[in-house]
Amino acid sequence: MNENLNWVAQHADWFYLIGAVLFILTLRGLSSPKTAIRGNRFGMIGMAIAIITTFFLAPSPVFVLIVGAMVLGAVVGTWKARTVAMTQMPETVALMHSLVGLSAVAIALASVLHTGVEHSTIARFELFVGCFIGAITFSASMFAFGKLAAKSWAKTLKGTWVKPVQALLFIAMLAFGIMYFTTQSMPAFYAMTILAIIFGWMWIAPIGGGDMPVVVSLLNSFSGWAAAGIGFTLGNSMLIIAGSLVGSSGAILSYIMCKAMNRSLLNVLFGGMSSSSAAATEEDTGPKTYRTGSPEDAAFMMENSSSVVIVPGYGMAQGRAQNAVKELYEMLKEEGVDVRFAIHPVAGRMPGHMNVLLAEADVPYEDILEMDEINSDFAGTDVVLIIGANDVVNPAAKDDPNSPIFGMPILEANKAQTVMVIKRSMSAGYAGLDNSLFYMDKTMMIFGDAKKVVEDMIRHINGTGH
């Protein structure tokens, strides 16, 4: 038995390499909805190999602690997975990122406090980087969680004092980190950690709600780099590889999303889009008229059209309407209508939010099209049905140089023959901006909960409406 244990320990790097290859195949699989399930399976197998190999490397007392922590985590994770609503998925993802950051800080502190261990120059640098990235990830992700969950304590910071304070915190954090690196001063390490936690909060707090999808993606990247940094501290090649994959893929996704918003990453993180209605342009003042309609009107127009494009937004998630939307899609298909979905890269509250909801409802992948694939088709579309989307269809991004979102690529729904919008009210979207699309002559506003409105449309299409 001991010989088998020794053999596994001696060949641990090979097992970790196999796990790393499976993680790479996971990312490749997740690049397409059609291969996502297979990609997830690769990831599960790779993680199982990594965990089992780590068991063989761990001494008995540590092994018991690992098993205990895994059991506790599995219980909490299973409960959370079964109880969390799809509308709460963005803030749940942000919360998970915060736990990765907190783990990195805890491991760094444990390594520094480990008596009888002399840390080399490289080890101190790894602890310095891993700890402050983990601390920033922890507090920044906690604020993102609070912001997305609309918690009262996650208040946006405003004022000219914010950026100077951010700069001072960052400089002080680096100064104490360098002091620890050069002198191994524990008070300096503690000060760096505390300042990093404060900086993470202060860094994300001024960012408006419209930029939160990019922030969530970037924090995903940060959690990966924090894990990689701690992997160096622990001498665990699997953790280094996995963390690097998460960090690099998250960074690439953040770049793609910024490109979709026609913004630079620095502008998002240190400039930002206003999150309040004060960001509205001067043209937004004064009364405006809009046309309203009923679900019955919308049902009649859609079933008598030849093409319909559905644009889902956070309103669909909030109303948990994805299954009703799938039923509407199927009924229109049966009537001979060409129905497709248009997805904007930053729709919802996190990357891929709408894709996840539609996949949950088993909408065929071939009818879910990204912005670049479908934008040229809007001009030839009879009806566009917008469900709770605001900023991603706002023509101000193309027409109003004074708008905070000017230059941001949008779904060009305004070019369709008829536009129908399901909203609870005429309130502004998450970025706090009014939408001129809602006041066009071709646009019909349908007020109400997304799920109820879509269900009413379905009843009128199948002839059971009243």
Image (spheres, rainbow, N blue to C red):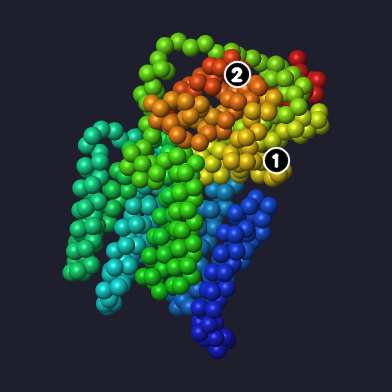
Q: Is residue 113 left or right of residue 60?
A: left
Residue 161 on image: x %, y %: 22, 37
Mark 2 residue type: Thr
**Residue 207: quarter of image:** top left
Tell me the SS state at disc 1: helix
Between 174 and 236, the one lying in front of the other is 174
**Residue 282: quarter of image:** top left
Q: Quadrant of the C terminus?
A: top right
Q: Is residue 162 left or right of residue 430?
A: left
The answer to whether the residue labelled 2 contacts the one labelled 1, judged by CB atoms less than 8 Å apart, is: no
Q: Residue at x 53, y 53 (%)?
A: 77
Residue 205 visible in the shown view: no
Residue 3 on image: x %, y %: 55, 89
Q: Residue at x 38, y 70 (%)?
A: 232
Residue 205 on image: x %, y %: 34, 40
Q: Which residue is mark 2?
A: 443
From mark 2 to mark 1, how far is it between C-alphas? 24 Å
**Residue 209: quarter of image:** top left
- Count neighbours of disc 2 (C-alpha within 10 A) and say few if under 14, some if 14 to 19, many if 20 or more: many
Q: Residue at x 40, y 44 (%)?
A: 264
Mark 1 residue type: Asp
Q: Residue at x 66, y 16 (%)?
A: 294
Name above or below for residue 343 compared with residue 173.
above
Q: Is residue 377 left or right of residue 116?
A: right
Q: Which residue is mark 1?
A: 367
Residue 348 on image: x %, y %: 53, 37
- Count neighbours of disc 1 (C-alpha within 10 A) and say few if under 14, some if 14 to 19, many if 20 or more: few
Q: Quadrant of the N terminus?
A: bottom right
Between 365 and 353, the one lying in front of the other is 365
